[in-house]
Structure formats: structure tokens, C-alpha cells
Image (spheres, rainbow, N blue to C red):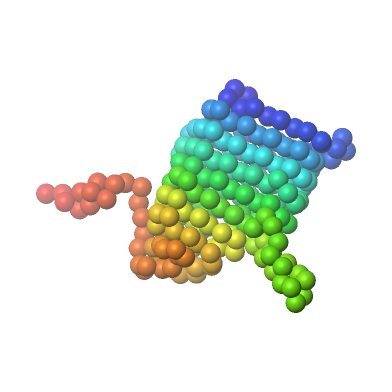
């Protein structure tokens, strides 16, 4: 497919990978690289995929990107350790630049419908290395799922860490560090670490002045 480089290595002949890419998908400077077996990638068309990069190493991993009317720019998905991670991105996702890393166990990432992500956003479901309790000799920083609800706007430079949950119709302010589960919908989340700074809100893709002009009809 034009604009997309596909690399598959170390595939077991009896455990093939499954790659389903809709024929209407448009790619620019994009790459999918798989090393392993029984991985599944499903990509439905977006307005445009620009510099999409997916790298999977291991087995039984699944990436789903549903149909979108928006541009998906600079989406990087890396799962280079562990097995059985899943990433699901629902309909009408759009972004300027997102880096997703899932590098431990069977973590799951879910991004809901109609989400708008700015650029320089990072999502992590694990730490990548162990922090060990010397009394028990056990690592306590185990991986955790991340869930982002429907119609969420994630602003520039946000870091979303393992175990985070962002509820429907929420806004996460620029450069916030999200480290936990939030349950109340229709909020603004901001800060380092992030907390709820405003309740009872929603957001719209139109500029603020453009949105307000609809109520100034003479």
C-alpha cells in the first residue's frame, strides 16, 4: 500500500499474524513492523494517516484503530516486550502527535469515541523496569491498564501514566501529569500531578469565539 511500509519477521508458520487494513486508508511516511506471531492489527480509514508508526515484538498482541473523519498525525505505538497487550482506539479519533508505549505484561489501553489529542502526548501502561521492595524481594510497580473515555480533549504535552482513567467529556490541560483514575465526567483535569480544577464543563472543536457567535444572532 502506497505510503506504508510493512515489515514482518520471526513469524511462526502455524501461528500467522493477521493484518487488516481497509483499502480506503491513506498513509504518508508510515510503517508497521511486527516481530512475532498471532498478532492482530485492524486499521479502518481515517482522513489521513501521517507518520503512523506501529512496532510490535512478541505474540498475541492486538491493535485496533476504528474509522475516523479526522487526521491522525504522528501516532506512534510501541509494544516491544511482553505479550498479549491490546490497544483499542474508537471512532473519530484525531491527533497531532502521540507516543504510546506498552512494554510489560498484558496491559490494555482503551481510547473512546470522538477524542481529540494534541501533540507531544505520551501514554505509558508500565514503567519498563522493576522497583523492588527489599523486604519482600518483589517488584511492586506492576503494569496497569489505561482508559480514556468518549469525547475527551487531551492538550499539548500531557503525560498519561499507568492506571489512569479519564472520564467522558473531559479536558486535560496542557503539560498535565495524569497518574490516577478520575470518575467524575465533564471536568477539566490539570496540574502536576493532575487534579480536577473545574466541574460541569464540556468542549467543542470550534474556536471559543466562533462557538459564542452562534448565540449573538440579531
In the rendered image, the residue lying farthest to the front is 134
Q: Residue at x 74, y 43 (%)?
A: 57
Give the left or right position of residue 190, taking residue 57 as reference: left
- Quadrant location, the N terminus: top right
In the rendered image, the residue lying farthest to the left is 218
Locate residue 129, reporting x and y percent.
69, 57
The answer to whether residue 51 of the structure is visible from this angle is: yes
Locate residue 152, reporting x and y percent.
45, 55
Question: Closer to the camera, 120 or 172?
Answer: 120
Question: Closer to the camera, 65 or 53?
Answer: 53
Locate residue 10, reporting x and y percent.
81, 36
Q: Residue at x 65, y 51 (%)?
A: 102
Question: Closer to the camera, 72 or 141?
Answer: 141
Give the left or right position of residue 218, taking residue 147 as reference: left
The answer to whether residue 107 of the structure is visible from this angle is: no
In the rendered image, the residue lying farthest to the top is 2
Amino acid at each position: 500500500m502506497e505510503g506504508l511500509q510493512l515489515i514482518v519477521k520471526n513469524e511462526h508458520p502455524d501461528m500467522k499474524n493477521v493484518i487488516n487494513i481497509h483499502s480506503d486508508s491513506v498513509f504518508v511516511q508510515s510503517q508497521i513492523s511486527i516481530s512475532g506471531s498471532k498478532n492482530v492489527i485492524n486499521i479502518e480509514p481515517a482522513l489521513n494517516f501521517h507518520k503512523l508508526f506501529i512496532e510490535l515484538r512478541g505474540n498475541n498482541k492486538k491493535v485496533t484503530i476504528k474509522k475516523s473523519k479526522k487526521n491522525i498525525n504522528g501516532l506512534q505505538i510501541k509494544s516491544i516486550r511482553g505479550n498479549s497487550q491490546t490497544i483499542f482506539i474508537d471512532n473519530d479519533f484525531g491527533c497531532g502527535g502521540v507516543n504510546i508505549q506498552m512494554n510489560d505484561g498484558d496491559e490494555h489501553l482503551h481510547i473512546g469515541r470522538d477524542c481529540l489529542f494534541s501533540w507531544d502526548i505520551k501514554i505509558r501502561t508500565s514503567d519498563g523496569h522493576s522497583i523492588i521492595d527489599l523486604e519482600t524481594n518483589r517488584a511492586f510497580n506492576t503494569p496497569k491498564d489505561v482508559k480514556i473515555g468518549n469525547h475527551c480533549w487531551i492538550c499539548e504535552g500531557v503525560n498519561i501514566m499507568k492506571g489512569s482513567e479519564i472520564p467522558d467529556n473531559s479536558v486535560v490541560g496542557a503539560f498535565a501529569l495524569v497518574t490516577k483514575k478520575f470518575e467524575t465526567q465533564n471536568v477539566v483535569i490539570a496540574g502536576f500531578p493532575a487534579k480536577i480544577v473545574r466541574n460541569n464543563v464540556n468542549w467543542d472543536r470550534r474556536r471559543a469565539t466562533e462557538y459564542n457567535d452562534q448565540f449573538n444572532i440579531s
